[in-house]
Image: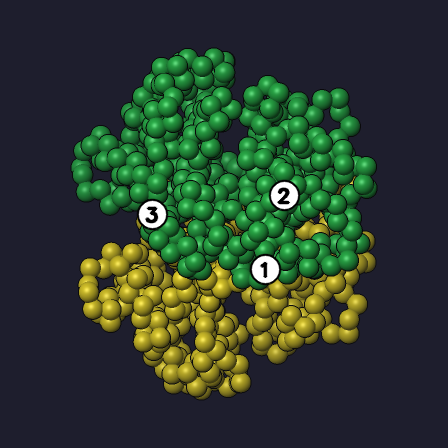
Chain colours: A yellow, B green
Amino acid sequence: MNNFEYYNPTRIVFGKGAIANLERLVPATARVMLIYGGGSIKRNGVYAQVKAALGARAVVEFGGIEPNPAYESCLEAAELARREGVDFLLAAGGGSVVDATKLIAALVPFTGDDPWQLFVQRGVVMPVTALPFGAVLTLPATGSEMNPIAVISRRETREKRAFDSELIYPRFSILDPEVTFSLPPVQVRNGIVDTFVHVVEQYLTYPADAPLQDRQAEAVFLTLIEEGPKALAHPADYATRATLMWCATHGLNRMLACGVPTDFATHQIGHELTAEYGLVHAESLAVVLPALWRLRKAAKLQKLSQFARRVWGVDEADPEQAADQAIERTVAFFHAMGMPTRLQDYGINAEEAARVISTRLGTRALGERKDVTSDVAADILRQA
Amino acid sequence: MNNFEYYNPTRIVFGKGAIANLERLVPATARVMLIYGGGSIKRNGVYAQVKAALGARAVVEFGGIEPNPAYESCLEAAELARREGVDFLLAAGGGSVVDATKLIAALVPFTGDDPWQLFVQRGVVMPVTALPFGAVLTLPATGSEMNPIAVISRRETREKRAFDSELIYPRFSILDPEVTFSLPPVQVRNGIVDTFVHVVEQYLTYPADAPLQDRQAEAVFLTLIEEGPKALAHPADYATRATLMWCATHGLNRMLACGVPTDFATHQIGHELTAEYGLVHAESLAVVLPALWRLRKAAKLQKLSQFARRVWGVDEADPEQAADQAIERTVAFFHAMGMPTRLQDYGINAEEAARVISTRLGTRALGERKDVTSDVAADILRQA
């Protein structure tokens, strides 16, 4: 097991009717900016519940945060927050809204010249303070509700990048599974695949003498595989929705990454596909992952065969064949969730994508051994 | 799944050489009280590492914290801390030292009349502030390093009670598996059994539509069962020790309790056995648990048979027989760890213990349905 540090001060308030807790969670004298997306919160009742719980607090609204939230929108929101003297942010939405809120929290007091350096020089240029904020989650998928990471897209340059800081942990996140009943099936599908891939990226590398973390990851896989089909079949089944929501949080609250190597290459190549071709985040992951596994099978053989045996119940002594079966079973699961797994399903030419994306990746080296160069990424995309 | 709230701001710093991080984790200007137990930290090198990392900081020492830490010692330590103007506490030891430090942190600024009311009126009389403190863990077992609970024994009245408060989370806990190499086998055994029982108490109740939490608990069981024998056979195997240490933290960082019923009756009856007969904490648990399961089998049948199938690999269709096998397998595991499971192993008459302990429990009602009255506890002890 590798040395590690784990710190996660986000308070999770989970369950039916949990939004009412805003009343005690948001400081009584706060001047709040309520940040949301395309307005679904006004249709599904979340907006009304939030406003009721905030009571007499002064609220400035900033709606219209995009899927793959735009850097430009965050700059605009931060400007408004400064002008209005806002001292607390409240995100109401999915991972995009939470991620945007994290960046806005860092931007409001930011005094450097160029905030994009937070992303380009991640870990070097760091915020020194941030506004406090909380979240009301409406779409379980990204785990952003309990981590210190924001993924932001810059429209001007078609870049999609991440930054992280302990200052951008939500003070609290409210998770009411009932607000997910009205999600369209395609968003349920996206959340399940996104969670699944997050867990893969913290598990499917090389053995690292971390049997507890392995089994904790397998716990999430097994649960997603059991509960995913139920959620699509019975959208208003509370227990299933609650479990999927809690799975998504565990997918990326970073506990699974404690002491183990990680391979976020699928996400990083996927981000480029989203930035270039506009694929939805989870769609990009489902396209990249199986191709990456096929190409990197030798390097991941021990974990792939463990995954085959423990998660998919594959009874096959030959590790290569077990790995192949695990890949097929995973692809079949994605398909059963309604998720395509090929670039051609989106009318994208794999050869062209390989060329374009490898150029975008430039000299970046990805993967648990930093050996997924842009050439390797090109090979992955040719097989996607 | 039940509604829940989860908040855990303790920073875990895990790995080889981690004690050196005290230099950055303890405020540079702190006036520190270093709290420890019987002095094993002076023999195993922890004391020297701690002192080196604290550098020029002013340090007051308070040694001699007992196993089952004494309320009376905590009062004395708090008095000394006040007299010396201490503003930061540092525990170096096992769960007893960490628990004592939690109480001392609450006692130093306590202004009420009778601090024992924190225990007797748990959740009603609460601390309003506490000194900040950190921990260097030397014995993985209780999970105290990442939870807000202190279990304290009052010598004067032979009571053993718990209290909890968000104010008594450690600011940080340092977990270096290498410091556990020199533990005697009996303490390794105790830590494994304590962890196992913590997980049981958050899992083995009635089904609560919480499949993720079930599998997360099973992850810890499976890991303990695999790694426990290795730790006894190869005391200096780093990977095994690291895994057991991380298992113990997960056993009671309260994540497993999210959204599910819990049954801490084994601990509560065990505390009385310790207070009355001086059994070591883990010994008391290993005596109570199998008897409790046998008596409460019907109420716990569904979970016991799931436990049999998933954790022990029992292939038995009849739930009753599966449950019986799970109980036997668990007892055999405790024995393999070197842990007795009968009162008579300690020369205690079960009939007498039933009478004495049920009197001590009085009107308290334990268990996931609050139906383990003192009479039921007496029946459990008769079978122990």
Which chain letter matches label 3?
B
Which amino acid does the dot numbered 1 rest on? Ala
Instruction: Select label 2 or label 1 by which is in front.
Output: 2
SS under mark 2? strand
The quadrant of the picture occupied by the N terminus of chain B is: top left
Q: Position of residue A30 (x, y in %)?
A: 76, 45
Q: Earlier in the sequence, mark 1 or mark 3?
A: 1
Q: Earlier in the sequence, mark 2 or mark 3?
A: 2
Would you name the residue on which mark 1 appears? B18
Would you name the residue on which mark 3 appears? B225
Camera-side residue of B62 and A5: B62
Classify mark 3: residues with Cα within 10 Å, few (<14), some (14-19) or many (20+). some
Between the C-alphas of marks 1 and 3, the distance is: 27 Å
SS under mark 3? helix
Instruction: Select label 2 or label 3 by which is in front.
Output: 2
Q: Position of residue B173 (x, y in %)?
A: 60, 50
Q: Earlier in the sequence, mark 2 or mark 1?
A: 1
Camera-side residue of A353 and B372: B372
Q: Position of residue A374 (x, y in %)?
A: 47, 84
SS under mark 1? helix
Which amino acid does the dot numbered 3 rest on? Ile
Which chain letter matches label 1?
B
Q: Residue at x 59, y 68 (%)?
A: A162
Q: Which label sits on residue B36?
A: 2
Is residue A292 visible in the rendered image? The answer is yes
Which amino acid does the dot numbered 2 rest on? Tyr
Q: Position of residue B138 (x, y in %)?
A: 54, 49
| Quarter of the view holding residue B325 | top left
Classify mark 2: residues with Cα within 10 Å, few (<14), some (14-19) or many (20+). many
Camera-side residue of A85 and B56: B56
